[in-house]
Image (spheres, helix red, strand yellow):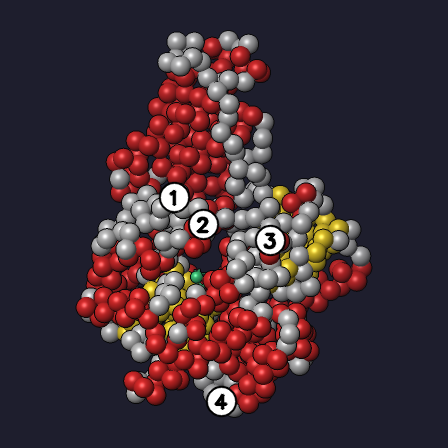
Amino acid sequence: MFHGVGVNAGRVLGQVLQMPATVAEPAVTSPKDAGASLEANKAAIKSAAKTVQTQLRNRAETASAESKDILHATAQMAGDPMLIKAAGKLVSPDAPGGPRSPARAIWEAGQTVADTLTALGGYMADRATDVLDVRSRIVAELQGLPAPGIPVSPAPYILAATDLAPADTATLDPTKVLALITAEGGPQSHTAILARMLGLPAIVAAPGVDGIVDGTQVYVDGAAGSVTTNPDESMRTAAATWATQAAQMPAFTGPNTLADSLHIPLLANVGTGDDARKAAAAGAEGVGLLRTEFCFLDREKEPTIQEQVAAYGAVLAAFPGKKVVIRTLDAGADKPLPFLTPADEPNPALGARGYRTVATSAGVLERQLTAIATATAAHEAEVWVMAPMISTAEEAAQFTTLAKSAGLQTAGVMVEVPSAALTASAILSSADFASLGTNDLTQYAMAADRQLGPLATLNDPWQPAVLKLIKLTVEGACQAQVSTGAPKPVGVCGEAAADPALAVVLVGLGVSTLSMSARSLAPVAAVLATLTMAEAQRLAAVALQAVSATSARESVREQLPILAQLGL
Ligand code: PEP
Ligand code: MG
């Protein structure tokens, strides 16, 4: 049995497939190819490229309409005569710098093509990533390694990995993947966020799961955080029971009310227009967090204002008349954007990230606010804008001024740095609202990198220190309301809101909205509907008095029998 931190409940059985390792840069020469003739090396390149092209075309046959086009375009790139010709020149004995191995030749030729595309900018620059993907596939084929990227399997499987990055999972097909299990990664890591987004049971920080042999049958219990090989009969029954419970989970149709009819809006966290449409279909009452950096993660250059207007507009169009909170670019640390964040900081999580890039990248924020204002004018959604990583009242005031001068009416801040929680009343004297980013708030309060598996128990939003910072933020908002006379709402948009038991505590602590991935709306609403505000407040007091994250979680869960009934 392997133990880790459960980040999304659910019990499933299935075969494990490992995420292949990323392809490393090949050495300039390889003993295996050095003795081969020039013709043989050229033929090896051609044949590997052809195999990759065929694999991609075959995958396109069974892919969704959206992925089909992408796969066909990538397949075409694999057969690009320019790429193959350039690689062919590099294996020749007259190549400047001496002959390369076929794998090295493809590696260098791919880089040259990618650099040329990047220099062209716009649409062409976006294709550079695809060329690099094709290059890795051809190199893996030449080296006899498994193809990089999400494994392809006709049968559903449990995806195991050391950790998963946003780029790895872009092509993950949720109808094929039953659960995610990773050896590293914390409860707020990308793997955890993705699992909740896709509604997949998931366990992170489970050392050893990245060594399970492909095809091994395992039982995954997302609530308990355990992975068991050779599952027994009781586990088969548990998985079957969970499948029934999951199928019976009442759909969320909103508005979300407590048992005493109090309305606590449930909003969605989204990254694209597609996410927003899915969130609207899942009953979201609006968007509590549009992570704008997710629209542009693969960009080398700042997107134009028109591109930004289109990306934000696609989200606003899904929520006419509803609240949509747009967060300005939160680049840095786990989400680097080459045009905004320095690549050489020794400690990027504590570096020039989030709002701080206003000082290092002149004009980017102003142009983004213009784009948001333009998209707002063209749609009916009620747009709120907020800045990430605000640490001081001065920063909050500067941002609010910038946003208002761009014509945006409601400007607020994320509270995700402990200093912001501690000075919430001063911050909210200028900002119109606050949104608690519990993922970063936890990592900074506990000084524990949210991406590090071994620190997962520290990186837990149930930690007493984190709950106290949340309480302080709500109290700061009340003080600010008294002094400014205007209501200063405090929502939560970190992953904490997606944990149904913690959602109860957050409501009891006084937060006014909860924002989460669309899949979490139904379970959170089903649990909140069983409690009155007085009961939520009592459970918040129970959590606040606990001396550890574990005892806070266990004492609250014990008093919520609905969780077991719903399989949560
Ligand atoms: C957070 O930190 O809680 C948050 C919502 O922002 P992100 O996860 O995008 O850093
Ligand atoms: Mg954050």
Three-letter amino acid code at the position of disc 4: Ser
Q: In terms of sequence position, does the residue under pointer 3 or pointer 2 come before the other?
A: 2
Q: Nearer the viewer, mark 2 or mark 4?
A: 2
In percent of width and height, residue 426 lies at: 34, 76
Residue at the spot of label 4: 261
Tell me, yes or no, if residue 282 can be seen here.
yes
Q: Which residue is mark 3?
A: 453
Q: What is the distance, in whole Å, between disc 2 and disc 4 at their CAs? A: 47 Å
State the separation of the CA atoms marked 3 and 2: 18 Å
In this picture, is 562 found above or below 117? below
What residue is shown at x 44% (from left), y 36% (from top)? Answer: 133
Asked which secondary structure carries label 1, the reply is: loop
Mark 2 sits on what residue? Answer: 347
The image quarter in which residue 501 lies: bottom right
Tag 1 residue: 343
* Marks 3,2: beta carbons within 8 A: no
